[in-house]
């Protein structure tokens, strides 16, 4: 009799604990639908064409590089002529709780002769910038 009561109490506590944990974790990962992205380009010496490529590349959060670049004969024979820069993107109001904004730092390189581009994520962190 005591064993059944003990198991019943233990099962009740397990269910209640499970119900308390689920809403807590859901609040922490909740995303806000309205987001705004700011792009900061560290290198001032890049061309306007490369600057426009960078802004187009990072302003779309769902952008994925398909890995296919059309290389001309010059790039095939002599290699790419790369312009590189450090790029920071700040996506505002990503989370509903503070810190709300997500800052990512990338190295970005693009060929000035063809459409080759490569981006490497250096780091990301949540920052306090929006209330």
Image (cartoon, helix red, strand yellow):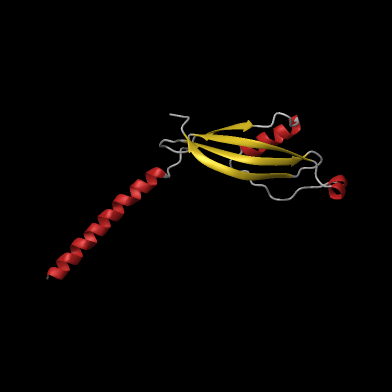
Of residues 110 and 27, the one drawn nearer to the viewer in this rendering: 110
Asked if residue 23 lies left or right of residue 8, the reply is: right
In the rendered image, the vertical position of residue 1 relative to residue 37, given as above or below: below
**Residue 68 versus residue 53 in the image, above or below:** below
Quadrant where the N terminus is found in the figure = bottom left
User: Where is residue 77 drawn, in percent x and y?
Assistant: 87, 49
Is residue 28 toward the left or the right of residue 53 in the image? left
- In the drawing, does residue 11 fall left or right of residue 65? left
Q: Is residue 85 above or below residue 14?
A: above
Look at 74% across and 32% down and name the residue there.
46
Number of marks present in the image shown? 0
Residue pushed farthest left? 1
Image location of residue 26, percent across then percent down: 38, 47
Residue at horizontal 66 percent and vertical 44 percent from the top: 119
Q: Position of residue 53 (x, y in %)?
A: 71, 36
Q: In the image, 13: left or right of 91?
A: left
Foreground: 127 or 7? 127
Task: Tell me the quarter of the picture where residue 2 sits.
Answer: bottom left
Q: Residue at image x 45%, y 35%?
A: 100
């Amino acid at each position: 009799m005591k064993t059944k009561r003990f198991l019943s109490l233990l099962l009740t506590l397990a269910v209640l604990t499970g119900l308390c944990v689920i809403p807590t974790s859901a609040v922490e990962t909740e995303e806000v639908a309205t987001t705004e992205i700011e792009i900061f380009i560290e290198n001032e010496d890049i061309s306007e064409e490369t600057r426009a490529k960078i802004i187009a590349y990072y302003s779309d959060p769902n952008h994925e590089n398909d890995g296919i670049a059309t290389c001309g004969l010059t790039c095939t024979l002599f290699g790419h002529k790369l312009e590189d820069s450090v790029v920071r993107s700040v996506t505002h109001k990503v989370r509903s709780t503070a810190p709300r904004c997500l800052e990512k730092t990338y190295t970005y390189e693009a060929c000035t002769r063809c459409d080759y581009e490569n981006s490497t994520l250096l780091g990301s962190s949540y920052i306090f910038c929006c209330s």
